[in-house]
Image (cartoon, grey):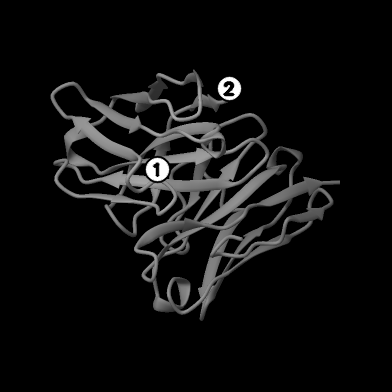
Amino acid sequence: QSVLTQPPSVSGAPGQRVTISCTGSYSNIGANYDVHWYQQLPGAAPKLLIYVDDNRPSGVPDRFSASKSGTSASLAITGLQPEDEADYYCQSYDTSLSASVFGGGTKLTVL
Amino acid sequence: EVQLVESGGGLVKPGGSLRLSCAASGFTFSNFPMTWVRQAPGKGLEWLTVISDGGIDTYYADSVKGRFTISRDNSKNTLFLQMDSLKAEDTAVYYCAKRSTVTVGYMDVWGKGTTVTVSS
């Protein structure tokens, strides 16, 4: 059971918008710790997608955005493309565990 | 090109030890904290440990505390993970990653991973 809860899967058709939630608690996201998002393509290493709540590294399209409110965060992908099919993970810090924590991951399927 | 290359994975018996290495290039290694993350077959990412840029501060996940030791050699741009008392549940792909800050930071550069299999 992950400290940060994500839906196991989401799906959408090309061109559509999807969102992936990341639900935490008052010891992590709710304590205002930064949330980061990673994309893991099939068979590849994870790649940083969004850092410090809603910042994109160079090269990440602006179709990807994120937000945070209360004890939750979410990743939004607009204009869905086949190459977006991947696993997505949120990450934050938990003060009760004194550790970095990941969400369980969400598999995005592009229909 | 910024790059991290892990090595040292393999097959080891339960109770055995293994030492992973992560060779860094393309950035000033000694300026950044570094971390290890693993992924068991078909499972999600699990943060394991982080070490400060100078190697003084280290933090561990409860699942590996007392069994795994992170260290670094800044003169050789190399990160290490000493894994002792290995269990079947340690079977995973192990990734090293460059970290923005020691505790709350993000991981902006990842290696391709090295596979560790613990089995008799």
Percent of width and height locating residue A24: 54, 71
Counting every numbered tag in the picture gives 2
Q: Visible in this render: residue B1?
A: no
Query: Pointer 1 and pointer 2: residues touching (CB < 8 Å)?
Result: no
Looking at the rendered structure, the secondary structure element under dot 1 is: strand
Q: Visible in this render: residue A49?
A: yes
- Which residue shows up at 40% across the image and 19% down it? B7
Using the image, tell me which numbered label, if any, was put on residue A93: none
Using the image, tell me which numbered label, if any, was put on residue B120: 2
Mark 1 crowd level (few <14, some 14–19, many ≥20, 10 Å Cα): some
The chain letter for the residue carrying disc 2 is B
Q: Which residue is mark 1?
A: B108
Q: Nearer the viewer, residue A108 or A99?
A: A99
The numbered mark, 1 or 2, whose residue comes first in the sequence reads 1
- Vertical relation: A30 (above or below) A6: below
Describe residue A24's horizontal placement relative to residue A52 as left or right: right
Amino acid at pointer 1: Asp
- Which residue shows up at 72% across the image and 52% down it? A79
The chain letter for the residue carrying disc 1 is B
- Vertical relation: A102 (above or below) A86: below
Percent of width and height locating residue B51: 25, 44
Amino acid at pointer 2: Ser
- Which residue shows up at 40% across the image and 34% down it? B85
Describe residue A84's horizontal placement relative to residue A89 as left or right: right
Mark 2 crowd level (few <14, some 14–19, many ≥20, 10 Å Cα): few
- Vertical relation: B90 (above or below) B8: below
The mark lying in front, picked from 1 and 2, is: 2
- Which residue shows up at 35% across the image and 28% down it? B2
Percent of width and height locating residue A65: 56, 60
Looking at the rendered structure, the secondary structure element under dot 2 is: loop
Percent of width and height locating residue A43: 64, 29
